[in-house]
Image (spheres, rainbow, N blue to C red):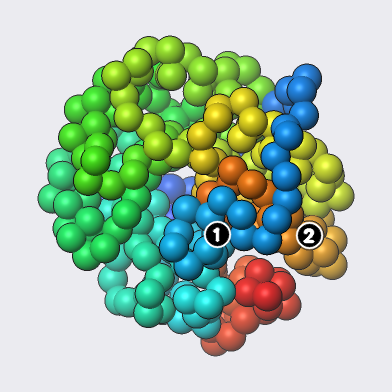
Amino acid sequence: MKFTSSVVSLSLVCAGSLVEAADMLNMQHLNRAPIHGHRSDLSARSTVGSSFSSGIKKGLSFNDASLTHHFTSSEVSWAYNWGQTYSGSLPANVMYIPMLWSDSSASTSSWHTNAQAAINKGAKYLLGFNEPDLNAQANMTPKQAASAWMTYMQPFAGKAKLVGPAITNGAAPMGEAWLDEFISLCTKCTIDVYAMHIYDAATNEAYYKQYISSFASKYKKPVWVTEFGATGSASQVNTFLGSMVSYLDGLEGFGAYAWFMDEAGNLVNSDGTLTSLGKTYAA
């Protein structure tokens, strides 16, 4: 799901030949998933469990690579653009991670070449499908996704860590219900990391923390939140983001995260300088 954090707007995300657009209002039908009955026993320590040698879990989701240069490798360690390649450059020592967005021919036809090229350039991870449980995004059944995983992702097992389909925090049959069925069908799939997206109100911080820690506890593998955002006033969102960055950096068993997103009016101004929210994210 793609939307800005504090205003209702339309964000176009170019992923190779794919263009995604999503409106914040669309989230109204995406009922929030319940919290699991058990709480995680994950403890909090600074940068515990990072998937990157730098120890930095923080990443950037972007359309325009030039806007990433107001962050440094001491602040972020990885970046992605929902695609397989990008134009321009990223900050030094920031890892680009390609994504197989869906099983459409637009995604799969170039995947092997682009994924291998990214690995050759230093990518240690490959991202799976983008919100396959959501009709407006990759829109794949668990069976469809399991088949596509074995065809397109599994050949890279051992060459890079494979990050599973990034599901929403929607209620069944979306979210975890979708992922559970996918896992049951994909018994021969290598999935090194589980991925999720989460959106709600900035005032509902406790929900985010409970949901993420419980998700990590349930699936017993490193977890990445490759998109998260929140609705609310600018002040509320800023406070929320600062608190979540601190929480996620210290959550054991949690590998990486990326705020939605590094774009003008969100983390950066139109001239590329950091907004107040961007400064909070970079801190």
User: Residue 24 or 149: which is nearer the viewer?
Assistant: 149
User: Residue 106 or 86: which is nearer the viewer?
Assistant: 86
Residue plotted at (45% across, 59% down): 52
Q: Is residue 30 left or right of residue 201?
A: left
Q: Crowdedness of circle 2 by 10 Å Cα count: few (<14), some, many (20+)?
A: some
Residue 281 versus residue 3 in the image, above or below: below
Residue plotted at (59% across, 43% down): 253
Q: Position of residue 77 (x, y in %)?
A: 47, 67
- The quadrant of the picture occupied by the C terminus is bottom right
Q: Could you say which quadrant of the image residue 33 lies in? A: top right
Tag 2: amino acid: Ser
Q: Position of residue 223 (x, y in %)?
A: 54, 41
Q: How many marks do you count on the picture?
A: 2
- Residue named by callout 2: 243
- Residue named by callout 1: 57
Tag 1: amino acid: Lys
Q: Is residue 114 visible?
A: no
User: Residue 66 or 213: which is nearer the viewer?
Assistant: 213
Q: Position of residue 133 (x, y in %)?
A: 49, 27
Provide the secondary structure element on which disc 1 rests. Answer: loop
Residue plotted at (45% across, 39% down): 193
Tell which circle, 1 or 2, labels the residue nearer the N-terminal end: 1
